[in-house]
Image: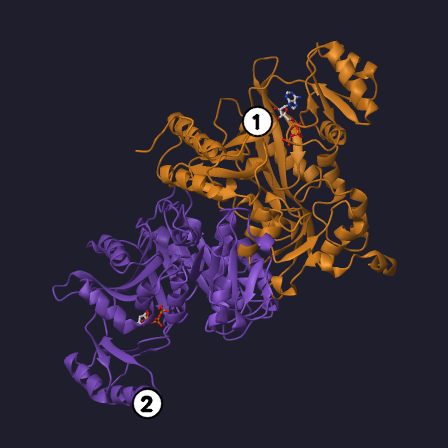
Chain colours: A purple, B orange
């Protein structure tokens, strides 16, 4: 790095750094981000004889709790990003918000950033993503860049009012997505948002049959591996459940979805894990059809089930991919695995979380509870539960329905310390 | 702790301690020991929203690499053991060598030590263990405390020369086990060892058909859960392979072994994971019979397969048990899982370990490689590989033989960078 950079590099006391944190001779993986995704990447790295260096905003952040080499800093601060990248064999992310110009600079200095900004842009800007997907022939809803109230009014008329307005950047968990109920509301919404400086697009509101997620991994060398497609359930724009494999409903959309993810990962030059969030809908001839909603270039909530239902978890796979190492087997190890999210409730119950976990384990000894070491806040993702059908059983509709219901009971108990089915023990 | 203790407490600069290492409100688990077992307990703790505090001999020890809260010290130093125990919700171990008087003292102060010295003594002293097992009716080989040359000569004559001499304490990986080939050699061996101050016992050399390992967990509240019994293969006294479940050979020794482990864990008041190493032999009527060889009160090499072949791994189960939390499902998730140890070879090949891992993954995408972040040393345990039969296949003799051979090929490649079957890629 250039000498004028050194001048502005923060003093080393903003690190909890231990050179001894990394096994002798082993590659060092730097992760920008300190949330549960970074935490679970670290957990996977440990198994491989590695350990991650983490850029964390707080010393007690989810991932910082479990790493020996932590840079305390801000991903929006160029020096902090430089510091975590120094000497790392690869730099990766647990979110898409690092300014691309920093990453381009790092790449210019020879730092190995994965995925690269040329790919990342498609997970950062929904308009760029929509255009690129249309260009490569991937199915997307009709969409339009919205730069004026007239734009949205025109789009409203063209779609007979089936309008979804989205901010191009920075949305997550449904924030930045609006469904105006009238032409008037659409106009007012867009006027307000444009005045606030929010860049917008509009797209056709799709009649969802369900949501699917097709996950795939690609290494810089070009190796590609995909997982079975899952069905995901969203509530208020937040993923609350994933079912693997996605139950068959007739039509071959599942295979098409997996194939599509493999096409996108290669055409966009993505490295590491890519999640392709999809809508399943019905076309004008009554046939099932898939449409791409969203891309994420990192391990994704809809892939958490792989930790307990698959030979290679998405976290291990991401670590391997960004270090350009061979990818692992993505076959399932259970007839069906369901993931249910644990989202902070409107109030935190008195019973401590570890006692809630104990109650869940007492009722469901097979529940795999993953907690992120996070404090409660309403709606915050603080953990998830994976539950699988046992070896030797088969994924009948009844068995899957029971598994989904059990996983929801477990997650709901972890949130509110209440069995939503009134269960009082056997 | 008493005030005179405070005076001798080492200065805090021997810690890499971060109070932020532990999630708010979550129990803190202290682990005395810094090896791969502590490392893998930490990995399991992370998933549960916890993180371990580790007493490590070196800052770069296997477990210290992956923990944010590390006490640098010596388990033979009372102050260091006190320091790691301070404020912990439970104290546990990755080896059996902490002096019991320290632990008794901790318990006196109200520290929650699991397992307790009253149980641990049976994993520390082979004579005490043999006597206790005989007392509770567990099958053990004929044995005798050896306090003189005459003792071993008498035992030699009584067993027709089928003698195995063992040091009562401190043995591991076959160190501390001798098979004298003649009466003369037995006498000389014992004379030398007694002169060196080694406390001894002799036991009858058993005609092994094979070795088995029955693993079980017990919580302080008395909950017990056992895993399927495995067959283990030892080379030069070191475990090199485990096959789960142990292939059936006729007779009901497998069920008996599991039952025996459940009896021992309860009768000895063990908490946490207990490994019962067993010999399978043939009795005077030609019937298969099991005999207890050795006890370990912690996760054990013959239980590493549970990480990839079982709903609940031995590391998660141990963490849950010592914190007195409900135990997890111990059912298998694969028709068969084989563990092969990676032991440092006589020389370390030029190819770096991460490249060797890559080669193994290229050939076996389903190989689960676990590395401990350790430097190479001849014979040192530096990692292991788990391989499983895929979902939907069945564990025929051929399939299991192939799996064992594949796991050995993988482990051997990790050791020596050579495919022992001459494979040169497809
Ligand atoms: N065109 C559309 N038609 C119908 N529903 C939509 C459309 N776009 C979004 N939604 C609904 O809103 C939810 C959130 O939308 P989207 O995934 O674009 O938002 P996000 O904030 O980027 O979410 P995420 O964090 O999952 O990426 C979707 O899961 C879907 O349920
Ligand atoms: N009585 C015996 N008869 C026959 N073989 C024996 C006997 N005792 C021990 N062995 C052989 O020696 C090996 C090592 O013995 P043992 O397990 O007692 O030693 P250790 O050093 O405590 O090993 P570990 O680290 O496995 O506990 C056994 O696995 C077995 O192969």
List x then y, in percent, for residue A93: 43, 63
Chain letter of the residue beneath label 1 in the structure image: B
Q: Is residue B142 above or below residue B306?
A: above
Q: Residue at x 40, y 36 (%)?
A: B389
Q: Is residue A422 visible?
A: no
Q: Determine the CA span between mark 2 and mark 1.
A: 73 Å
Q: Is residue B269 visible?
A: yes
Residue B37 numbered mark, or none: none
CB at mark 1 closer than 8 A to ligand 2? yes
List x then y, in percent, for residue A146: 24, 82
Q: Is residue A119 above or below residue B413?
A: below
Disc 1 element: strand
Quarter of the image where one finds residue A274: bottom left
Q: Is residue A51 left or right of residue A208?
A: right
Disc 2 element: helix
Q: Which residue is mark 1?
A: B234
Residue A195 numbered mark, or none: 2
Chain letter of the residue beneath label 2 in the structure image: A
Are callouts 2 and 1 both on one chain? no
| Ligand 1 found in image quarter | bottom left
Label 1 neighbour load within 10 Å: few <14, some 14-19, many 20+? some
Circle 2 or circle 1, nearest the eye: 2
B162 and A151: which one is in front?
Answer: A151
List x then y, in percent, for residue A196: 35, 87
Q: How many marks?
A: 2
């Amino acid at each position: 790095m250039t000498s004028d950079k050194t001048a502005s590099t923060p003093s080393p006391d903003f690190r909890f750094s231990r050179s001894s944190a990394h096994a002798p001779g082993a590659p060092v993986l730097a992760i920008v981000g300190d949330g549960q995704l970074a935490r679970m990447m670290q957990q996977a790295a440990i198994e491989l004889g590695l350990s991650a260096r983490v850029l964390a905003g707080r010393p007690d952040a989810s991932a910082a709790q479990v790493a020996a080499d932590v840079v305390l800093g801000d991903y929006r601060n160029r020096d902090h990003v430089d510091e975590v990248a120094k000497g790392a064999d690869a730099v990766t992310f647990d979110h898409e918000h690092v300014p691309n110009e920093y990453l381009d600079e790092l790449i210019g200095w020879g730092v190995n950033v994965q995925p690269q900004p040329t790919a990342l842009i498609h997970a950062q800007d929904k308009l760029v993503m929509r255009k690129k997907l249309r260009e490569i022939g991937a199915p997307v809803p009709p969409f339009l860049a919205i730069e004026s109230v007239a734009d949205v009014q025109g789009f409203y008329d063209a779609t007979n009012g089936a309008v979804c307005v989205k901010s191009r950047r920075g949305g997550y968990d449904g924030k930045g997505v609006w469904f105006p109920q009238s032409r008037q509301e659409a106009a007012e919404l867009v006027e307000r948002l444009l005045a606030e400086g929010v860049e917008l697009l509009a797209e056709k509101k799709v009649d969802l049959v369900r949501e699917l997620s097709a996950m795939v991994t690609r290494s810089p060398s070009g190796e590609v591996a995909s997982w079975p497609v899952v069905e995901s359930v969203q509530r208020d724009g937040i993923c609350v459940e994933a079912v693997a494999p996605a139950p068959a409903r007739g039509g071959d959309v599942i295979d098409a979805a997996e194939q599509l993810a493999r096409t996108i990962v290669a055409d966009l030059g993505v490295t590491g894990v890519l999640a392709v969030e999809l809508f399943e809908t019905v076309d004008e001839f009554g046939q099932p059809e898939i449409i791409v909603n969203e891309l994420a270039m990192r391990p994704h909530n809809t892939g958490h089930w792989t930790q307990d239902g698959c030979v290679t978890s998405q976290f291990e796979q991401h670590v391997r991919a960004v270090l350009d190492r061979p990818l692992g087997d993505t076959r399932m190890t259970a007839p069906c695995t369901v993931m249910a999210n644990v989202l902070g409730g409107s109030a935190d119950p008195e019973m401590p979380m570890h006692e809630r976990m104990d109650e869940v384990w007492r009722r469901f000894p097979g529940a795999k509870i993953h907690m992120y070491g996070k404090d409660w806040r309403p709606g915050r993702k603080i953990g998830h539960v994976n539950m699988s059908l046992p070896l030797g059983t088969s994924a009948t509709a009844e068995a899957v329905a029971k598994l989904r219901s059990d996983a929801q009971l477990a997650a709901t108990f972890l949130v509110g310390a209440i069995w939503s089915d009134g269960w009082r023990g056997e």
